[in-house]
Image: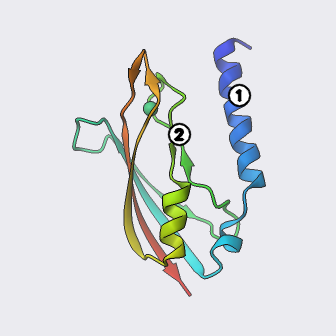
Amino acid sequence: MNGRSREAHLRFAERRRREDEARRLREEFPLLRTLKLEVEEHRREATIAETKHVRHIIVDRAPALFAMPCNDPACRDGGHDMTDPMAQRLRDKSTDFVLEDVCMGDVRGAACGRVIRVIASATYS
Ligand SMILES: [Zn+2]
């Protein structure tokens, strides 16, 4: 295993460990019923999303963690941890909200700066 893939492996293992130890959404937000996230990602200067996908969160099983990796393969130590702002909105029972985060990772010595936008739709009982 070379250094780079070992590092990626460790990072993956760390993420798994955090997810396993994290509280479940169901415990943190007992009134939350459904959660859908539309995730868009683009470079700082671009206005059109390069990637876009929809995630349906399985509220019964999902951890109360919203950390997403940076999609730039050259980015080191990047990613988006939206756990805190997400928790705040879910606690306030927000139904439709948008969160944005700029990647603080490093791409060949420069700031990555990729922007992620999460358009969330939630329902509560
Ligand atoms: Zn990045």
Task: Determine which of the numbered discs, if any, sits on residue 9 in the image.
Answer: 1
Residue at 72%, 56% (x, y): give it. Answer: 22
Instruction: Using the image as rendered, state which of residue 73 and residue 95 is in the foreground.
Output: 95
- Left or right of residue 29: residue 112: left
Q: Residue furthest bottom?
A: 125
Instruction: Using the image as rendered, state which of residue 102 and residue 58 is in the foreground.
Output: 102
Callout 1: 10 Å neighbours few (<14), some, many (20+)?
few
Residue at 55%, 65% (x, y): give it. Answer: 87
Callout 2: 10 Å neighbours few (<14), some, many (20+)?
some
Residue at 37%, 36% (x, y): give it. Answer: 114
Specify which label sits upstream in the sequence, 1 or 2: 1
Q: Which residue is mark 2?
A: 69
Residue at 73%, 44% (x, y): give it. Answer: 16
What is the x, y in percent for residue 64? 64, 61
What is the x, y in percent for residue 116? 39, 46
Q: Secondary structure at mark 2?
A: loop
Looking at the picture, does residue 2 appear above or below residue 104? above
What is the x, y in percent for residue 91? 54, 74
Looking at the picture, does residue 73 appear above or below residue 60? above
Instruction: Using the image as rendered, state which of residue 15 and residue 40 is in the foreground.
Output: 15
The three-letter amino acid code for the residue at tag 2 is Pro
Question: What is the basis of the colouring in this image?
Answer: rainbow
Picture quarter with the N terminus: top right
Query: Is the Cβ of the residue at disc 1 closer than 8 Å to that at disc 2?
Result: no
Q: CA distance from mark 1 to mark 2?
A: 14 Å
